[in-house]
Image (tube, rainbow, N blue to C red):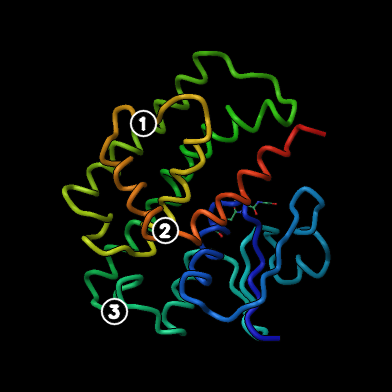
Amino acid sequence: MGLDIYYNPASQPSRSVAMFVKLNKIEHNDKVVNLFKGENKTPEYLAMNPSHTVPVMNDDGFIICQSPAIVKYLADKCKTADHWYPSDLKKRAKVNELLDWQHTNIRKHGSGVFFNIKLGPLFGLPPMTPEQVDEKYKELDGSLTLIEGFLKDQQFLCGDEITIADLFIANEVLQPTMCERDIYENHPKVKAWMDRVRERLNPVWGEMVGVFEQIVSGIGSG
Ligand SMILES: N[C@@H](CCC(=O)N[C@@H](CS)C(=O)NCC(=O)O)C(=O)O
């Protein structure tokens, strides 16, 4: 028993949870779930999470299946450094605001580029038309412009200290950087912020992103 973290390094919310426990040295059991092999659809997994998504946390039988809820629970339970998920009511509300935003905005638009343009062809899907590709990048561009606005002149999204909002949003921004176009061209602040996040979270960031890159390079190669 103990704390089981079910995740897959190719999933953005999974990486955020897995990175958080590693960064904070929270004792846990890594349970990597292979989505390609349907390990998220076994009766045992579905009994934990009928929505068959990763990540899932099972803390001695207490199960949570949404990534931000997992990280907030662990931050409070393990009393991680206050900057991650501040106890100050207003600072915490700002972090929550960005976590809610990322789920329906940058997550949607970053995935829109990464899945349709990078992964689709690797899975044998027909290529998108140039107009469709432009449209996906335009949507992503809108999200990146909003992130530039959130950053203002701060080091991180909620101020000069890193929070769990940076962790989740950086994992979403990462994926479309693996496609052909330079998504930072008109967003130098986002690039500088991503560099800071990587620097702040290494070596954990680099290790997990490395595993993710290996998974992507293996797709479509038989
Ligand atoms: N809102 C969920 C999203 C989880 C999610 O969509 N996970 C994807 C991978 S990024 C997944 O497990 N997909 C497999 C499936 O839906 O069967 C969270 O934040 O935990």
| Residue 200 position (above or below residue 141) | below
**Residue at 44% from the left image edge and 47% from the top image edge:** 104
**Local secondary structure at mark 3:** loop
Task: Assign a secondary structure to mark 1.
Answer: helix
Q: Label 1 is placed on what type of residue?
A: Asp
Disc 1 from disc 2: Cα separation: 20 Å
Mark 1 residue crowding within 10 angstroms, few (<14) / some (14–19) / many (20+): some
Camera-side mark, 1 or 2:
2
Pick whichever of labels 3 and 2 is earlier in the sequence.
3
The residue singled out by tag 1 in the image is 141
Figure check: 125 above or below 161? above
- Judged from the image, the secondary structure of the residue bearing numbered disc 2 is helix
Residue 42, above or below 193: below
Taking the image in four quarters, ligand 1 sits in the one at bottom right
Residue tagged 2: 167
Q: Which of marks 3 and 2 is in front?
A: 2
Q: Earlier in the sequence, mark 1 or mark 2?
A: 1
Query: Which residue is depicted at the point 46% across and 75% down?
Result: 24
**Residue 87: numbered disc:** 3
Q: How far apart are marks 1 and 3 (CA)?
A: 33 Å
Q: Residue furthest top?
A: 130
Residue flagged by tag 3: what amino acid is it? Ser
Q: Label 2 sits on what residue type?
A: Leu
Can you give x and y, in whole percent of width and height, for residue 158 in the image? 25, 59
